Image (cartoon, helix red, strand yellow):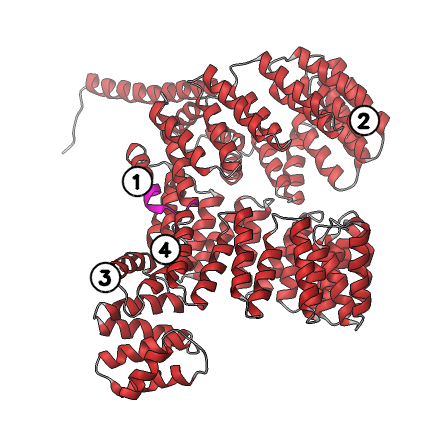
Amino acid sequence: MSRHFPIASLALTTALSLAACGGAESRKAEYMEKGQKHLSENNYEKAKIDFKNVLQIDPKAAKPYYYLGQIEESRQNWQEAYGLYTKAVELDATDMNAKIRLARLYLMAKNVDKAKELTSAALAGNPSDHDALLLRASIVNLEGNSGAALQDLAAVVQGDPHRVEAYLAQALIHDQRGEAEATRSAIQSGIDANPKEASLKLALARHYLAQKQTELAEQTLRQLIGEHPENLDLRNQLVGLYVAENRLDRAEASLREAIAAKPDDPRRYAVLADFLMRLHKPDEAVAELSRAIERYPDQTPIQFSLAAVHEKLEQVGKAQDVLRKIIDTAKAKPDRLIAKNRLAASYVAADDPEAATVLLDEVLKDNPQDNQALILQGRIALSKADPQKAITYFRTVLKDQPNSVEALTLLGGANLLDGKPALAQESFEKAAAVQPDDFAPLKRLVEFLVQQRNLSAALEKSDGFVKLHPSHLEALNLKVDVLLANDQQPAAEKALQEMKAAFPDQTVGALRLGQLYLSQKRPQEALKEFEAILPSAANDYEVLKGIVSARLDLKQPDQALRILQQTLASKPKHPSASLLLAMFYLEQNRDEESIRAFRQAIGNNPRWLLPYTQLAALYTRRGQPELAAETYQEALAVDPGAIPVLLKLASLAEQTQDFPRAVGYYERILAKSPGHLLAINNLASLLSRDGASGDDLKRARELAKRLEGKREPAVLDTVGWLDYQAGDYARAVAALQQAVDRNGQEPVFLYHLGMAYLKSGDPFKAKEFLGKAVESGRQFAEAGQARAALQGL
């Protein structure tokens, strides 16, 4: 049966359809216009929303992807920008702007062929396109054709005299070619065409500096500052000039002039404080910031700067006080959250995760997506050996910031702790790929690969980075490390020779080469390397140590002694020669002379703890624990919070069975570093000795809670022995057996396990392990109890 629709109804339906279509197009145009306006105003968040609204209406519109790419590029989110530009080109192959932007990213990634392909396509459509010509100039210059690059740049400035980057590129190429006059001329031409452009005048000042024409550089910078009196960066450039010339008073005066020009700018106080810190004037830095806070009490950035100064001075308590004041008084909520995060980070650094967690919970209650708080919570979880919780925190960060190198690197560490090396490698690989020019994530990836014994991949990664950055000294060092780990000593030697040639002013290549030769029993060649760099590294401990070691390997102790004596004769206060002399005498069993040399080393450099600890170790070996303790106390007088020294004193007290004093030292360590694992373990162990009081056992159990999840043998022994003291013999046996499985040579572990088996009703196992403890031949405090228990069996 046919259906008939009224003409009026059909007309109405058509009209509504057209209206809907027209409305969508109208809204699309409106969002596009708003997005372009917000983009021009650098209001990226609003622009992003507008362009995404366009894509909701029309997912195949190319331009929104191009504009979104610009937003991500401005934020240096290179991978996101790459994806967006690629999509724009895919949807509209005629969009030359998107192609040029994409070509720039390819060039940044060192993919010259792809960059050239896209640039050629853009120029085929418009041979005079200035953006494309600028890009082609960069490409051909990279390929070594600087003449063709200059031709392209000349075409750009002729067509548009206001393209500042073209003049700067010309100057750069002339500078690379060593054409100083042409460099200056290119910059001056740009200034003539753009007299108000600060970047060109700044380039001219830098050119004058490079040519050692400091008066002209200073004059140019002062003119610039006069034109832009509120520009702090320009003033910092002038300060840098004064510092380079060691005109420090003038530099400080310039920084104070900057404050006078805009006294309500908190950055200026921070820069002055940093400068005063570098001049070793910490009291003045604190005073300047304190006065500024009194004048501008609502400027929390100045308070944050004061906290940072206290942190640099290791005045943790004062830094924390400043941050607490910000939390209590800041009017802006973001400032309070930042202060809470900073204070929590300070607690984490001081091994007080509980206090940090309280603050971080408050931050995340106010802002569940606070990435800094999430990162810190993840770090705390890692410190507690809770990789699953850490992984949750880091993944939450990555949902918001998928290219966070910090979160990716930490996630890799958490996955590794969780026993999932494949996932760990995936995270480390992503972190390195996000910023391919950043050495830190690449280094972490390579270290992981070495740890996993995947040495071929580690070498491939390190070598690839070196090829892209042949002048990166740290990368070359890392490559040598990988080669040595892979036992490719000839290749390592070749790499070090190349490092020496590439960095003739650096001593590291020759130093490492000499150390390699020493390890290969090639002392004569090692000596040649060390002696070649001695004049430029006369104060370097490793160089002088290398010379002495080489002479000793050559059976030339007299010459080793002579070089040390000559060094001290010419420089009695040499920072390390006295210590090396002491170590030489120690090697020769000349104890009295060694002691005198140690004392000289301490006198020359009283804040260096190594001579104290080495001298104390000598006294301990000679059976003079009182003198050893006195020497450690001298070191503490210099650095009262030196944890390595406190650990040595605690160990010495344990050896002499002065257990109350050992407990006191461990308590001092934990007061400074509440999360110090060794101190926690040793203190818990001491407090749970046979015959311990109820209070001591209670304190030991509290400490043991912080050892949960740790698998080190000493920790397992402590935890197991506490279970023994509590009468839980089954749990004690389980933990103590693991300790002995990991270290079956330690008589204390064997004694504890034997006693646990005895109490759990297994006399045969008890006899086995008590017998091993007694027969070990090593002294331990409970040896008498072990023999008595064995005799009882």
Few, some or many residues within 10 Å of mark 3 (<14, 14–19, 20+):
few
Few, some or many residues within 10 Å of mark 4 (<14, 14–19, 20+):
many
Q: Which residue is mark 1?
A: 358
Q: Residue drawn at (39%, 42%), measured in percent from left and top? A: 347
| Residue 355 falls inside the magenta stretch | yes
Tell me how far mark 3 sits from mark 4, CA to CA. 35 Å
Tell me how far mark 3 sits from mark 2, CA to CA. 82 Å
Tell me which amino acid carries mark 3. Gly
* Residue 661 visible in the displayed image: yes
Left/right placement of residue 387 relative to residue 582 reads: left
Tell me which amino acid carries mark 4. Pro
Q: Which residue is mark 2?
A: 183
Observer-side mark, 3 or 2, equals: 3
Tell me how far mark 4 sits from mark 2, CA to CA. 56 Å
The N terminus sits in image quarter: top left
User: What is the magenta segment's predominant secondary structure?
Assistant: helix
Identify the element where label 1 is drawn.
Answer: helix
- Picture quadrant of residue 154: top right
- Picture quadrant of residue 204: top right
Q: Which residue is mark 4?
A: 387
Left/right placement of residue 599 relative to residue 663 reads: right
Q: Nearer the viewer, residue 581 or 144?
A: 581
Q: Is residue 650 above or below residue 201?
A: below
On the image, the x and y values in percent for residue 601 come to 67, 54
Tell me how far mark 1 sits from mark 2, CA to CA. 59 Å
- Mark 4 and 2 residues: CB-CB less than 8 Å, in contact? no
Identify the element where label 4 is drawn.
Answer: helix
Which residues make up the magenta segment? Answer: 350-358
